[in-house]
Image (cartoon, coloured by chain):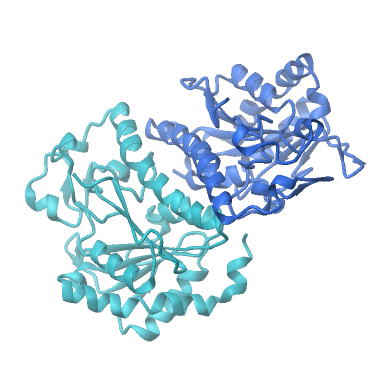
Chain colours: A blue, B cyan
């Protein structure tokens, strides 16, 4: 069984730290299948298809550590706080999740303790270790989204999402529009108002670290060649965006 | 040796969660005495005298859990992030801390991993467990400050300090001025700009939890009777301030 959290390139020294909360559609036996058939457990509701491969491609190109989850977001969505309905969702897009329909408080607490706390504790430790050494890691979370949602086709290809501190995300957006040729949108297909920036808010904002959430349409990550091509396109954007905002701003919030 | 963190009244069900980061002036043998004599290790630079006793008095009166540290703030100041100079201070007020003068990166990381991460992990777990049960704990950190600082006498008796969300702290201030007879000041003798609100920022703000930092002048906590009298005075202020801001605001940031 894969662990709840894995850390790759732990000793990498680049300026970025990559996070992939929805890397896996693994359902550990103790949680059963939540009443879902195999197709639903493979669908975008269970994970972000292609996101882990892209995150690895970015981490390799950028010399960055990668913190990735090893469990389906339907068991616990690691980009949601424990009180959010979406942390252990009863429904997601057009699917119902029978195994989450009537969770007791004890079961919500047990999943929080078994999944949420260890994942975010491990990520916190990686960040704190770097802060103690005088580094200021830029936190980049990597997600994918479905091209068709509630029957509507989405034209956005790359979503760039921020929480309370938009400076770095806006620079990524500007750079990506110039350099990637992708349909790039700021705070689409989701934004902080949809509750999707929990990891940024929990792990980056308290330390004043630059941060951004990337959302890539998953039909652009359909196979290994597509993922590598996307990693080639996106990797240079992240340091170039850092250059845009300059080192002065990055030190202001120490 | 006392543990890095202790949790008292863990199953208490009241609306508050009390935190005391500077509860102890314990120096575990592995860290030595940092080159300080016994008087310095008893002084306000090493801990917040009276804060733990007051925090316990408040926790008992309010039916609140208490998360308290078991180590001197000079070894690691749990209300500071790992990159802050004050996390492992080289000097504090009129004192130099020889044992912190030339810490290596490895030693800064080791203290971060041995002290900062376990304390904040334990506090995070207490908060997350309550959130998973649908509760919204109000985070109250309890500190004390020295009546004479750099030779200047301070007249403020009760300081009420906020970070990014001032609503609850302002209500505590208004209530305390009406009800306690103390010289109450908002954001004195310190404020968020002095970097003293790390615990609030790390543990309360990401969840939109109401929060406040209390600073009591330590000559008002000089013995057990004084502490009990202060707890009697302050305990009713906290729920009354919650009434002032009303339940509507508290649910707005879920």
Residue A181 visible to the viewer:
no
- Which image quarter: residue A67? top right
- Which image quarter: residue A242? top right
Tell me the residue at 30%/65% (across/down): B55
Split into 4 quadrants, where in the image is the C terminus of chain B? Answer: bottom right
Image coords of residue A220 (percent x, y): 81, 25
Tell whether A41 sits left or right of B51.
right
Image coords of residue A134 (percent x, y): 40, 32
| Number of numbered discs on residues | 0
Identify whether B20 is placed above or below A86: below
Say which of A65 and A111 sits in front: A111
Say which of B204 and B91 sits in front: B204
Image coords of residue B228 (percent x, y): 23, 75
Identify whether A109 is placed above or below B154: above
Say which of A176 and A20 sits in front: A20
Tell me the residue at 54%/28% (across/down): A3
Identify whether B137 is placed above or below A72: below
Split into 4 quadrants, where in the image is the N terminus of chain B? Answer: top left
Tell me the residue at 79%/43% (across/down): A189
Identify whether A166 is placed above or below B144: above
- Which image quarter: residue A73? top right
């Amino acid at each position: 069984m894969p662990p709840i959290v894995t850390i790759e390139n732990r000793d990498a020294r680049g300026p970025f730290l990559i996070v992939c909360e929805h890397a896996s559609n693994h359902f550990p036996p103790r949680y059963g299948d939540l009443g879902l058939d195999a197709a639903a457990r493979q669908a975008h509701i269970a994970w972000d298809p292609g996101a882990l491969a892209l995150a690895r491609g970015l981490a390799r190109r950028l010399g960055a550590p990668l913190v990735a989850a090893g469990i389906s977001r339907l068991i616990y969505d690691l980009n949601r706080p424990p009180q959010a309905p979406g942390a252990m969702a009863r429904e997601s897009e057009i699917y119902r999740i029978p195994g989450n329909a009537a969770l007791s408080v004890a079961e919500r607490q047990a999943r929080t303790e078994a999944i949420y706390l260890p994942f975010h504790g491990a990520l916190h430790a990686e960040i704190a270790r770097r802060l103690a050494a005088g580094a200021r890691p830029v936190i980049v979370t990597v997600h994918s989204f479905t091209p068709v949602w509630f029957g509507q086709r989405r034209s956005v290809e790359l979503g760039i999402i921020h929480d309370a501190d938009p400076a770095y995300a806006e620079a990524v957006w500007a750079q990506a529009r110039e350099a990637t040729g992708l349909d790039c949108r700021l705070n689409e297909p989701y934004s902080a108002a949809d509750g999707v920036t929990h990891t940024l808010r929990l792990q980056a904002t308290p330390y004043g670290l630059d941060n951004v959430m990337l959302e890539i349409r998953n039909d652009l990550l359909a196979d290994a060649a597509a993922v590598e091509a996307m990693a080639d396109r996106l990797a240079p954007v992240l340091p170039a965006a850092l250059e845009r905002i300059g080192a002065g701003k990055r030190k202001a919030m120490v």
